[in-house]
Image (cartoon, rainbow, N blue to C red):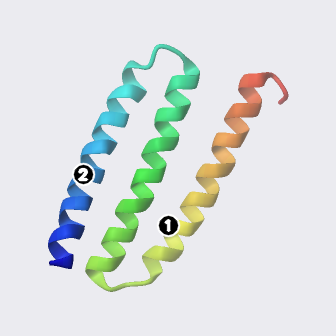
Amino acid sequence: MAETLLSVAAAITLLSIVISFVRFVLGPDTLSRVVAFDGMTIMSLSVLVFVSWYLGRTIYLDVALVYGLLSFLGVIALARFGEGEL
């Protein structure tokens, strides 16, 4: 039962990544693209956690943590650049 639920959650996450990618490509302005990119990174973190669970390897959780921190710093840098502070 738990594996079925996680498989459905993984499929929904992958679908949401595709939808965010469409928003990233078609976004009307830069802010919309930054938000879509941030959403894709958060969802890809979820995919890394699903892969970690399926394979039983905890190293992927470390990778997800580092990727999340770098993503956060990247979005902060882009937001500051957008405001003209950098």
Q: Do residues under tags 1 and 2 come within 8 Å of each other at their CB atoms?
A: no
Task: Identify which amino acid the numbered label 1 is placed on.
Answer: Ala
Task: Identify which amino acid the numbered label 2 is placed on.
Answer: Ile
Look at mark 2 in the image and give the residue it sits on: 12
Q: Against 9, is 35 above or below?
A: above
The extreme right residue here reads 85
Q: Residue at x 19, y 66 (%)?
A: 7
Local crowd size for mark 1, using a 10 Å CA cut-off: few (<14), some (14–19), many (≥20) = many
The image quadrant where one finds the N terminus is bottom left
Q: Residue at x 69, y 49 (%)?
A: 73
Residue 30, image x and y in percent?
Answer: 56, 21
Q: Residue at x 42, y 28 (%)?
A: 24
Total labels: the figure holds 2
Local crowd size for mark 2, using a 10 Å CA cut-off: few (<14), some (14–19), many (≥20) = few
Q: Against 74, is 3 above or below?
A: below
Report which quarter residue 79 is drawn in.
Answer: top right
- Residue 64's disc number: 1
Q: Against 17, is 63 above or below?
A: below
Q: Against 48, is 76 above or below?
A: above
Nearer to us of marks 1 and 2 is: 2
Residue 18, image x and y in percent?
Answer: 28, 39
The extreme top residue here reads 28
Q: Element under label 2?
A: helix
- Residue 76's disc number: none
The image quadrant where one finds the C terminus is top right
Q: Is residue 4 left or right of residue 25?
A: left
